Each structure stands twice: as C-alpha cells, then as structure tokens.
Image (spheres, helix red, strand yellow):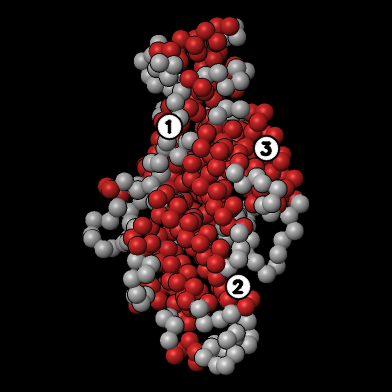
C-alpha cells in the first residue's frame, strides 16, 4: 500500500537525490538528524503528515510526499482517563452538562458561578421573574424595556470570561443561561421573543466551542445542533451555515483535510452573510494546507480576507467567531504556512500578529503563541522557541484547552529531537506538566 513507511522512505530518497541533496544537507534543511532521516528513508520509522509536508516544501514536490502519508485523526488534545479527576463527581464532562440541560433547576453551585449580575438569568421562570422584568404577567405580552440588550451585554462578559478560565468551568453557566433565555422567550412576543431566542442560540453555540475546548467533540456537535434549532425558532437561518464552519473546524483539529474542505465549502453559498462565508473560505484554506496544497490554500485565504473586509456588522447582534484578532487572515496565513511545511515564513507572520494581541485575551494568546513557538522550533530556532513557550505556559494552564494542547504536544515532540540543548532540558518538566494538567 502507498502509505507503508518503506514506500514513503524510498520515494523520499528518490526525490532527495533528484534534488541533488546529500543526507546531511537535507537534514540541515528540515532540522532533523541524519540518523532520524536514515530511519525514515529505510522504512524503520513512520513519517508524520507534518514531516511529509515539510519535505514537500523543501524539495518543491507539491504535496507528493504528503499524499503518501495517511491522515492522522489527532484528538489527543483531550484529557485521557489518567488526566481526569480521581474523585467521582468532582467535575462534569461537557457531555454531562448537555445531558443535564433539561434536568430541572440549576444547582446552588451553578447559580453562584454565574455571579451576582446574572442571578435573575439562571433562576427558573416563576413569579420572581415577573416581579423583576417589566411587562411579564401583564396584559402586554411583550416587556416594556427591552431586556435583550442586558442579556447581550452579559453574553459579552461570558466571552471575556472564556478567555481567562478553563472551559469546563463555563459550560454549566452557559447551559443555564441558554435554558433561561429559551424559557424567558416563552413569556414574550415579537422582536423581544426572537431576540432572546437568538441570544440563547449564541450561548449554545459558545457552549459548543467550550465543549470542543474541553476535548469533547461529540458534545460540541450536539451543542451546535441545539444552537441551530434555537436560531431557527427565532427566524434566523444564518446559524445553520455557521454550524458547517464549526463542524469543519472540528474536522480540521482531527486532522481530516477532506472533511474540513467539504464541510466548509457548504457554507460558501452567496445567500450566506459575508462574515460566515469568510470563515468558511478560511477553513477551506486550512483544509488545503493540511492536504499540502499551497496554491489552493492561499487562494481561499485571500477569498476569506475579501469577504471579512466586506462585512457590515450588525450592532444589535453578537458577532460570530473570534473577536480578539485585528487581522485574522494574516494570522491564519501564518498558521497555514506551518501546516504547509514552511515554518520560517510562518514564524515571521506569527511574530508580527502575536505582538498585537490584547493582553487580556489569554486563551487567544496561548493558542497562537504556542503555534508561533512551534514554527520557530521547526525552523531550527530551538532556544527562541523554548523562551516563547516558557512565557506562555501560565496562559496555557489557565486556558486548559484541548485544541491548544494539540500544538503543545507537537511542540514537545519537535523539541524532543534537541534533548541535548540546555533550554530544552530546562523547559521539558514544565512542558510535560502543562500537557497533563492537574484538575482541581
């Protein structure tokens, strides 16, 4: 079969010799040792997709080697059973939060987690709601002062909290808030009703992202589907298209280039708003990067840039997608160049973009900062990569993100090739601790 290591190794040797490179020269170009390369060329060591794309970039072979390596569905950013709390009931999984969504009243701990600003939001809809929200229980079915703006501001605060806290701590809060908004909408009509349902959908969609960050892809997909149903009830058909981009992102992190491209392409319809089409084009580009297609990747990223720049934001609706990137496509271009086996180019773009990230956006800084460190490590700038990673480890621990740990694990594997470098030896214990966090 074409994906056998022996076949890959023989093709790598043939292409290297055709390019006029000795094993030593090629080792210097890809920052692997001669011994490691010899084992791969002789079929004694299995190549990774990342290594294959790196070789394609150095040899200019247009994805030939990447096509010989099967896609690896890497979901290892999620906690393994050994990483989870030892005491039963210490923490509910993302799926557990979803299953308990309709179990009844929130627990005291969940109410306290929401905070004083939203006690009303998580309380069951009984006489207390009518006492505090003008219009409820009166002859007018719609509240007088529109409560939607208040809940919209609260959602903005939840997104900020999501930058600073482990995702599993926010999931119960988002579940209760989603339930509250859905139930509150039953007592309203007109624009208030649709506005509350739409906000409930945004909370559910955000819960899906936090579930993915917790390492629970199944719960992430379920929350996303729930968000689509809530949005449909509000008369908003936009979220169903956005859900395709969310599913595409899950496939991307799983290492499935084909599924990433197919799912994201489904949201490129002209009937879909420009911002969502921009995300769709971005994820198509990321899928092509995984497949090793440099030209198609950059073409779709440029399409994404044009679409996102043409967006006319609605001030009355929370914006979908990331909110802490001033130039998202340049950042993602750097991200994709690393997937394409061009770490030095990736590092240059990521350096510039990461310097502009807001200080409070810890999750975003950890996500792109670790990929920046990985780019420098693969470019052979090992000590600089270690310095960057060390600065980021507190943010990585705070984010407690399954998707960030994917790149952190790749960074650990890359640095393991340079064990004799003092900076690597010094960082290694802290890097290991960050990969296997202790759950409080």
Q: Disc 3 marks which residue?
A: 300
Question: Which dot marks residue 72?
Answer: 1
The 10 Å Cα crowd at callout 2, few under 14, some 14 to 19, many 20 or more, is many
Instruction: Single out the mark in the foreground, 1 or 2.
Output: 2
Q: What secondary structure is found at the residue carrying circle 1?
A: loop
Would you name the residue on which mark 2 appears?
A: 195
Residue sticking out furthest to the left: 87
Q: Is residue 199 left or right of residue 412?
A: right
Q: Secondary structure at mark 3?
A: helix
Q: Which corner quadrant of the image does residue 412 belong to?
A: top left
Depth check: give the residue in front, 263 or 113: 263
Residue at 51% x, 22% y is: 67
Local secondary structure at mark 2: helix
- Tell me where residue 111 appears, x and y as whole percent: 40, 76
Q: What is the quadrant of the C terminus in the image?
A: bottom left
Sequence order check, earlier mark of 1 and 2: 1
Q: Nearer the viewer, residue 313 or 368?
A: 313
Q: Is residue 369 visible?
A: no
């Amino acid at each position: 079969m074409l994906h056998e290591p022996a076949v890959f190794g023989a093709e790598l040797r043939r292409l290297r010799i055709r390019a006029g490179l000795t094993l030593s020269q090629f080792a210097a170009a890809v920052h692997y040792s001669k011994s490691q390369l010899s084992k791969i060329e002789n079929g004694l060591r299995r190549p990774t997709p990342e290594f294959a794309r790196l070789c394609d970039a150095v040899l200019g072979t247009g994805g030939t080697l990447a096509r010989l390596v099967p896609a690896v569905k890497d979901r290892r950013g999620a906690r393994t059973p050994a990483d989870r709390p030892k005491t039963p009931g210490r923490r509910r999984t993302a799926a557990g939060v979803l299953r308990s969504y309709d179990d009844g009243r929130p627990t005291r701990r969940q109410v306290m987690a929401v905070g004083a600003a939203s006690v009303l939001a998580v309380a069951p809809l009984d006489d207390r709601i009518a006492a505090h929200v003008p219009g409820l229980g009166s002859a007018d079915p719609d509240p007088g002062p529109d409560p939607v703006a208040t809940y919209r501001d609260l959602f903005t605060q939840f997104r900020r909290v999501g930058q600073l806290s482990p995702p599993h701590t926010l999931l119960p809060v988002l579940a209760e808030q989603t339930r509250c908004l859905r139930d509150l909408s039953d007592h309203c009509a007109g624009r208030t009703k649709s506005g509350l349902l739409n906000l409930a959908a945004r909370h559910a969609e955000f819960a899906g992202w936090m579930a993915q960050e917790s390492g629970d892809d199944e719960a992430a997909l379920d929350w996303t589907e729930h968000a689509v149903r809530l949005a449909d009830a509000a008369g908003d058909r936009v979220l169903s298209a956005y859900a395709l981009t969310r599913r595409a992102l899950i496939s991307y992190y799983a290492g499935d280039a084909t599924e990433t491209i197919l799912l994201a392409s489904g949201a490129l319809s002209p009937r879909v708003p420009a911002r969502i089409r921009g995300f769709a084009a971005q994820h198509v580009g990321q899928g092509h990067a995984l497949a090793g297609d440099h030209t198609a990747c950059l073409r779709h990223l440029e399409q994404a840039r044009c679409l996102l720049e043409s967006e006319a934001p609605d001030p009355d609706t929370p914006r979908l997608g990331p909110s802490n990137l001033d130039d998202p496509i340049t950042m993602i271009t750097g991200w994709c160049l690393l997937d394409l086996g061009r770490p030095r180019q990736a590092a240059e773009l990521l350096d510039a973009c990461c310097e502009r990230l807001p200080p409070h956006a810890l999750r975003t800084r950890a996500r792109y900062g670790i990929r920046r460190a990985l780019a420098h490590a693969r470019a052979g700038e090992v000590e600089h990569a270690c310095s960057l990673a060390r600065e980021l480890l507190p943010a990585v621990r705070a984010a407690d993100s399954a998707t960030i740990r994917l790149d952190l694990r790749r960074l650990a594997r890359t640095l393991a090739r340079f064990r004799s470098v003092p900076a690597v030896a010094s960082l290694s214990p802290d890097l290991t601790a960050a990969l296997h966090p202790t759950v409080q």
